[in-house]
Image (cartoon, rainbow, N blue to C red):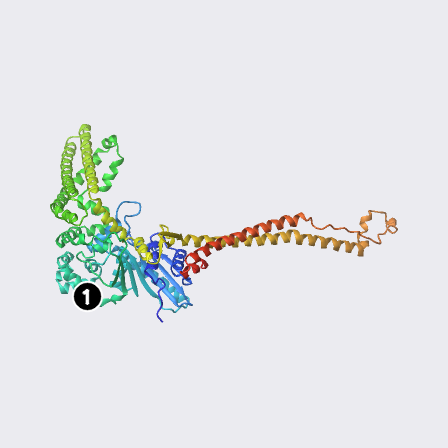
Amino acid sequence: MSQKLVLDTDLLRARVMNLEYEHLTAEEIRRIYIEETGSDPPDQIHVYHSQDFKNININDSGFDGTIIHFYDEEKRINQMYTIARGSEIQEKDTWKPLDWAYNTFGIFVGQNKNQYDDALRFDEMVTQKITEELKRNGQTIELKKIGLGHSLGGNHVQVIQLTAHRFDQVYVINDAPPSAYQLAYIDKRFRYELAKKFTPNILSDYNLIYSIPPSELKAFAEEYYKKQIDERSIHHLTAQEDLLYAVSGVRGFIDIGSRQVIDTNKDFTSIKDLIAKISDKDVKAIQVYLSQYSYIYNEKGFDGVVQAMTGVDIAFIESLQDYDTMDYVLHAEDILSKIDHMYDEMSEKIPVLLKHIGILYKNLDPMLSVFVQLGYMTVEEKNTVLSEVKGIEKDVTSIQQLLHELLNRERLIGIVFLNPVDILQCIETLFQIRDKVLDIEKRLQIIQENTMNLQNAITMSVNAHSLNEVIMALARSKGRTYDEYGNLILIKKMGAHEIRMNLSSAVRVYQKGLQILEEKETVLHKMKQRYFDEYVEDFEIQKRKLMNKIEDMEQNPWAYQRLLGHFTYDAERVYVLRRIEVHESIPPMDPMIPHIFETMFSYYEQEISKGKELIATIKKSFEEFFEQDQNVAKIFDLRY
């Protein structure tokens, strides 16, 4: 019998994927499952995080992911969900965009597969671990494997499915689509088929792939992979405003599987029309230009790419930020040596970069005209941007000239001697370069101010890309939403007004309240028992001991002869204790003792009773307010 999916709705999958960005736990999965289904999840939930497998990130690729294993013998459930994390804006503790750099070099250019390798290895390792555990326990239910992913994570699970066929089903949300360039770099069999179809030389010169007509490459790639897998195993959920969906029509990207498109923002459609205006020729030029830096990104990451494109040693420049004037003089020889080396690099790289800036300026007018036509900027804003970009080109040229002056001066210093005046003039030139950089920053600020509408469009497209926007769109149709902490908010309209009630918080208050009251009842029960043991029972025990003593004295008076004192031997024969009569009078326990305790116990019992009534009111209010939603009542009775 086929297993019913545990995470069987888009909303349930989206909420779990969104939680993966924080740090997914079995408790949080259970909470979300109960809130969305109104029923208990499978009996066993095990969570595996990629950072717990130390050898996963040996290349520091930036891959992160989580695997959830659900098992329930009674329900016949044995399912494993591999969640690959989506793109994060920047690397941890730095400004560098690691994941988005991978999007560029790994997907768009198609010449990096580090994150793919780590994602595949993570899935293989955890699958083996789960399989061995199931075997040890004698569990025979077939393991069903599902791949989940958002953004870059959606790309990972799709490519794994296309190349390694690891999953029974794949569900992706606002995914970065696979590209034929990426697949050809990863999948040698596909690349071999491309060589047979288009040109054998592609096996030795990968860059020839960019010369294959995009439409032919796309058609061939999609036909090839549809023969490798069941296309119905891949399911896309896409916000029509999503940025990645907007660029999915760009050369190289392929589309395999079913797709559901949803509207996450009624006031915004998409920048897809804008993206479509960019010529394929320009896109190809970008790909070819970036492809020469792919191997550097693979080896040195984003810093290596920046240095390779500009010849600027970022680490060296950053180290100078902490120097004062005297430091420059003291370390002049080392500084001049490094400037000399950096200049050699820049003399080769900067002209190429300036050439591309020139090409950008040359084509910027028609590109900005498209933005004007689409309503993303005014004519005045366009002209301002053009003027500032031209100014940036002039500033970069000036910086290049200043670097030449700096180099000539430091070489003169090196030939003659370390003259402090010349050194300070070198420092002055550095300050002039700094001022030019500040001028560029001011120009960039002006450009930013004059492209706000365009930025808003892109921002809205980026926002639509987030899982949170998708979750909100899916939830609206069910009369619910979620706050920033993932709490479920139920919405009900009362006339023209809208009432929102935080169900997650209410359930936590209800269940935590019950737990506290149960703990109080346990403590109260122990207090009563302790009172009975230490006062009531102990009083009776002491009374019984006294009565037993009296009875013993009356029945065995001779045993207490010593009570008469000490006599001589002959006197002891005369003075013999023959009978004891005890006239006992044992008063009852002081009535104030039970009164104090019973009053205290009664007070606590009333407080506990009031607490139960209060939290029962919370539950009843939700049930009555949302009487048509049967899941609401169930959620309160299921423990997170």
Please state, as top left, top right, bottom left or bottom right, where the C terminus lies in the image. Answer: bottom left
Secondary element at image label 1: helix
In the rendered image, the quadrant that contains the N terminus is bottom left
- For this orientation, the residue located farthest to the top is 421
Which sits in the foreground, 337 or 286?
A: 286
Q: Kindly tell me whether residue 410 is visible in this rendering.
A: yes
Residue 427 drawn above or below residue 113:
above
Residue sitting at the far front: 495
Viewer-nearest residue: 491 or 333: 491
Q: How many marks?
A: 1
Q: Nearer the viewer, residue 437 or 315?
A: 437
User: Residue 324: horizontal and vertical position, in percent?
Assistant: 26, 32
Q: Position of residue 303 (x, y in %)?
A: 23, 46
Outermost residue to the bottom? 1
Q: In percent of the image, x 83 and y 54: which residue is there?
A: 579
Q: Residue 20 at what x, y percent from top left?
A: 34, 54
Q: On the rendered structure, is 626 left or right of 612? A: left
Tell me if residue 222 comes above or below residue 410 in the rendering: below
Kind of residue at badge 1: Glu
Circle 1 is placed at which residue position? Answer: 223
Q: Residue 111: in sight, yes or no?
A: no
Quarter of the image where one finds residue 142: bottom left
Q: Nearer the viewer, residue 275 or 255?
A: 275
Q: Measured from the top left, where is residue 464 in percent x and y?
A: 27, 53
Task: State which quadrant residue 47 falls in.
Answer: bottom left
